[in-house]
Image (cartoon, rainbow, N blue to C red):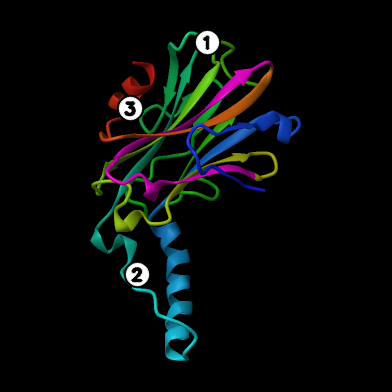
């Protein structure tokens, strides 16, 4: 069952609620994959309007009608003192225990098994120095902020890779005026991996700027 992260700062003890958690997937979805769901809703709404079943939705335009939108996913790996150990993103797609499935530059592709972009983390195979993993999403090009109409319904989520149970999810279109967001962090505490929602918006879409906001 998904745990909806409504408030920033909410902490979820992943290993306690999912005994033996060993692998997680970070999924980022926007664009064409989300559009298919919205088109289905629009058809239902249109039929309702025709046959008197309700009011027609006003969101009839296609997400991608205004051009491609490139949203990126990334993770930043830190040691116990807050120093960077590694970064996995579109330009450097692997590190010990971490793999980025591929860079969707338009919102029209699917490099993950389910979502546009996915990053796979094997918590047992990480560099032993890694104690924190920050989860990031940023707009590289094509939209002014996450509230752009073409990003309606976009999200980033964390799943148990072994059974595909969705653990946590963030809706990105809530971050109005922001091109980057630090969604939260995985961190190891007393032998358990936990997830803390942060929801820290960053006006810049530069991953370097976002990284500095984390590390300082």
Task: Name the one closer to the observer, 34 or 145.
Answer: 145
- Badge 2 is on which residue? 59
Work out whether residue 127 can be spotted: yes
Q: Residue at x 32, y 20 (%)?
A: 212
Left or right of 70, for residue 126: right
The span from disc 3 to disc 2 (Cα, nearest Å) is 32 Å
Q: Position of residue 17 (x, y in %)?
A: 72, 35
Nearer-N-terminus badge (3/1): 1
Left or right of 163, for residue 167: left
Q: Which residue is at the far bottom?
A: 51
The span from disc 1 to disc 2 (Cα, nearest Å) is 46 Å
The total of numbered circles placed on residues is: 3
Q: Position of residue 30 (x, y in %)?
A: 41, 52
Work out whether residue 111 can be spotted: no
Vertical position of residue 48 compared to residue 165: above or below: below
Q: Residue at x 30, y 24 (%)?
A: 208
- Badge 1 is on which residue? 80
Task: Name the one closer to the observer, 173 or 76.
Answer: 173
Q: Which residues are magenta?
A: 166-190
Nearer-N-terminus badge (1/2): 2
Classify mark 2: helix, strand or loop. loop
The span from disc 3 to disc 1 (Cα, nearest Å) is 20 Å
Residue 210's disc is 3
Q: Quadrant of the C terminus?
A: top left
Nearer-N-terminus badge (3/2): 2
Q: Position of residue 155 (x, y in %)?
A: 45, 48
Specify few, some or many for label 3: CA neighbours under 10 Å numbering under 14, 14-19, or 20 or more. many
Q: Which residue is at the far top?
A: 81
Q: Position of residue 145 (x, y in %)?
A: 28, 46
Specify few, some or many for label 2: CA neighbours under 10 Å numbering under 14, 14-19, or 20 or more. few
């Amino acid at each position: 069952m998904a745990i909806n992260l409504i408030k920033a700062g909410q902490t979820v003890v992943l290993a306690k609620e999912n005994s033996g958690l060993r692998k997680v997937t970070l999924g980022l979805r926007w664009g064409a994959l989300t559009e298919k769901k919205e088109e289905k809703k629009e058809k239902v709404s249109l039929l309702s309007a025709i046959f008197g079943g309700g009011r027609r939705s006003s969101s009839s335009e296609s997400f991608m009608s205004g051009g491609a939108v490139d949203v990126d996913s990334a993770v930043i790996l830190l040691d116990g003192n807050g120093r960077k150990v590694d970064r996995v993103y579109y330009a450097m797609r692997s590190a010990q225990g971490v793999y980025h499935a591929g860079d969707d530059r338009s919102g029209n592709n699917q490099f993950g098994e389910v979502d546009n972009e996915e990053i796979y983390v094997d918590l047992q195979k990480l560099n032993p120095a890694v104690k924190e993993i920050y989860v990031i999403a940023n707009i590289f090009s094509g939209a002014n902020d996450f509230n752009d109409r073409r990003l309606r319904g976009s999200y980033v989520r964390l799943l148990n890779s072994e059974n595909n149970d969705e653990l946590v999810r963030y809706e990105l279109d809530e971050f109005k005026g922001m091109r980057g967001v630090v969604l939260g962090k995985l961190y190891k505490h007393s032998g358990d991996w936990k997830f803390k929602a942060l929801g820290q918006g960053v006006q810049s879409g530069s991953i370097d700027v976002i990284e500095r906001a984390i590390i300082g």
